[in-house]
Amino acid sequence: MAAGPHYFHGTGRRKTAVARVRLFAGEGAVIVNGKPVEEYFPRELYQHVVEHAFRVSETLGKFNTTVRVEGGGVTGQAEAVRHGIARALCRADETYRPLLSKAGLLTRDSRMRERKKYGLKRARKAPQYTKR
């Protein structure tokens, strides 16, 4: 029986974005939704966010990464990818866990958008008060 490609996986979440990450042994290519990371996240800031877990664990250039990310906006997606990569690195080698945990990369950022309330314009913004 032929075994499939060996990889480590992790699921990253942030706001409404969900990233499914797979790490393969390789030379450091990161593919997000079928595009290179530089093409999917053109801003350097988001590229640094995505690479953060690799830099903390000193594994930059040791894994090829494929990511499927959906939902949310650009920032949420980049941070979801970072979370997924950190979780996948822990599956690859448990010795990375203390480093990633200390950097706060394994904690899911639980902050979500507050729902809109009736009678208000947004979650907390009230319509303008008129005295007369």
Image (tube, grey):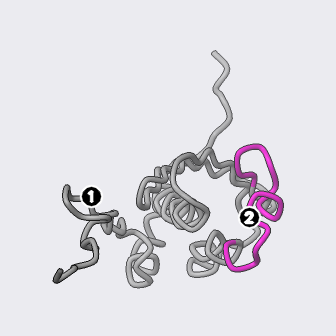
Picture quarter containing residue 5?
Answer: top right
User: Which residue ends up furthest to the top in the rendered image?
Assistant: 1
Give the residue at x 64% y 80%. Answer: 55
Amino acid identity at mark 1: Arg
On whether residue 117 falls in the magenta region, the answer is no
**Percent position (x, y) of residue 73?**
56, 59
Q: Is residue 31 left or right of residue 57?
A: right
Crowding at dot 2, Cα within 10 Å, few <14 / some 14-19 / many 20+, comes out as some
Q: From the viewer's side, name the closer residue of 70 and 114.
A: 114
Q: Residue at x 57, y 81 (%)?
A: 56
Q: Which mark is residue 115?
A: 1
Q: Circle 2 sits in a helix, a strand or a loop, which is it?
A: loop
Q: Position of residue 27 (x, y in %)?
A: 81, 61
Of the pair 102 and 48, the residue shown nearer to us: 48
Residue type at numbered disc 2 = Phe
Q: At 64% from the left edge and 49% from the top edge, which residue is drawn?
A: 67
Residue 41, which numbered label?
Answer: 2
**What span is colored magenta in the figure?**
31-46
Where does residue 72 sit, x and y in percent of width and height? 51, 54
